[in-house]
Amino acid sequence: MTDDERAAAEMRSLLGFARGLGLDEETVREIYETVGREAMATGASDDARMAEVRKRMLAAARGG
């Protein structure tokens, strides 16, 4: 799987999660890209990166 294919699959999954939280696609993309940049700088694993994205999505849905 290429990086682009992986990113597209991750976004599809996250957008499904976002619908349940009431978040829009723009918010999800912003969180995904921000966490991606941070993960690249720190060398975080894919699992840790995706966990952080979901954590921030939950915080955004709660208004935090």
Image: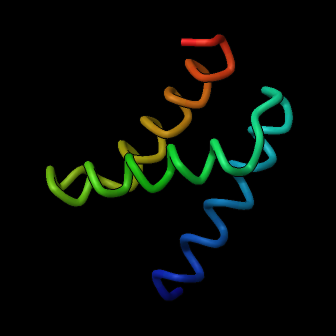
22 relative position to 34: left or right = right
1 relative position to 52: left or right = right
Q: How many marks?
A: 0
Q: Position of residue 60 (x, y in %)?
A: 60, 23
1 relative position to 40: left or right = right
Q: How is the image coloured?
A: rainbow
Q: Position of residue 10 (x, y in %)?
A: 61, 61
Q: Position of residue 23 (x, y in %)?
A: 76, 34
Which residue shows up at 55% across the image and 70% down it? 7
**47 or 31: nearer the viewer:** 31
Which residue shows up at 78% across the image and 26% down it? 21
Instruction: Determine whether 58 is above or below 18 in the image.
Output: above
Instruction: Determine whether 34 is above or below 61 in the image.
Output: below
- Which residue is at the far left? 42
- Which residue is at the far front? 26
Which residue shows up at 24% across the image and 50% down it? 44
Instruction: Determine whether 51 is above or below 58 in the image.
Output: below
64 relative position to 40: left or right = right
Q: Residue 33 sits in which quadrant?
A: bottom left
Q: Position of residue 34 (x, y in %)?
A: 39, 49
Q: Residue 6 sits in which quadrant?
A: bottom right
Which residue shows up at 16% across the image and 56% down it? 41
- Which residue is at the far bottom? 2
